[in-house]
Image (tube, grey):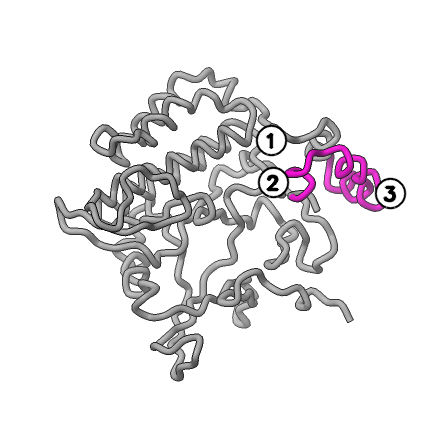
Amino acid sequence: MECPDSIIPFYYKLMDAVRIKDGVEVVIKRVMLEEDNVPLLQYLNSPEMLKDPRNNVVRLLEVITVPHTSDTFPQPSALLVMPKLFPLNSSHLPFRHVREVLNALDQIMEGIVFLHEHRIAHRDACNLNFMMDPTDVIPSGFHFACDWHQPDGVTRIHFRDRCSFPQLRYYLIDFETAQIFPPNSFTIGRYGQVKDVPEMSETVPYDPFKLDVYQVGSLVKTLIELYEGLDFLVPLRDIMRCPNPELRPTASESLSRLCSIVSQLDQAYLSYEIWLKDSTPIFRKYQTVSPDEKAKWWKFGKLAQLICGANKSTRLNVL
């Protein structure tokens, strides 16, 4: 018999749950205590560190120590209880306006500056590790294993524009590769989802903080490639992905460049609608109709026109 829990999560270390005392939806992740940097994550979630509004590290609601080991977890492990978040960059909840992209980048870069001020390099500050709190944007909630559906695993999610909620927050997750580095220190090794970082090496030391800058610059690159109307970010992309790390700006300098770019934009342009480049006209129409109208599209099969008319990459994201 099919039910929402029959849909298997994509990653065996993760599962969603509901906290009994208040009904809050959470995610539980089983991790190695030392290998997965739990002490560092706890430090970043300490009351003193959380006083800084730039701290966008994923919130730790609870850490539950697991008393036994197994073949999969041969070392001491724990269950991290965290808020249930939604991917920052998803075609199921696309950016709709220029200001939404700029708000996301501003929060992301502020968070990296915050980490770097505390001598912490994330080393995987990449697309899949940036998340958003969907509470206001997806009021119906979403299914953890198939986030384009509501919790019932069947009904399509309906979302509101991100710019309708100025308090919308973005978070950085997965601190397995993060590390505190003393001043003027370097690292070796290959880290993160971005594989084209020029200086990354197993033998030649490089600056881990400039690695973070390149990785965030690659997120900017991805957004420019996916959406129409973001070409004004090309200079930021190019300087953050400068092949020479010595010429690459720091995280703080990159944030200043972003602010400078934004200050030169016409205020009306901030509300300009943007679209995924590979979206069809009917897909764009679908994104602008009311939730009730969207439900009718699904019920009467009108969305099949969208799926059949879209190119392959869009179809895969829609289905």
Please, is residue 41 above or below residue 67 in the view?
Answer: above
Label 2 and label 3: CA atoms lie apart by 22 Å
Magenta stretch holds residue 312: yes
Which residue reaches farthest right? 300
Quarter of image, res 126: top left
Quarter of image, res 313: top right
Q: Decide if residue 297 is on the left or right side of residue 88.
A: right
Mark sitting on residue 32: none
Mark nearer the viewer, 2 or 3: 2
Q: Residue at x 39, y 16 (%)?
A: 264
**Over which residues does the magenta segment extend?**
289-316
Residue type, mark 2 in image: Ser
Residue identified by numbered label 1: 276
- The answer to whether mark 2 and mark 3 are in CB contact below 8 A is no
Residue type, mark 3 in image: Phe
Mark nearer the viewer, 1 or 3: 1
Residue identified by numbered label 3: 300
Residue type, mark 1 in image: Leu
Label 1 and label 3: CA atoms lie apart by 25 Å
Residue 176 at x, y percent in the picture? 35, 59
Say few, some or many: other residues with alpha carbon within 10 Å of mark 1 (under 14 / 14 to 19 / 20 or more): many
Residue 270 at x, y percent in the picture? 50, 23
Magenta stretch holds residue 13: no
Mark sitting on residue 91: 2
Magenta part mainly helix, strand or loop? helix
Q: Decide if residue 87 is on the left or right side of residue 150.
A: left
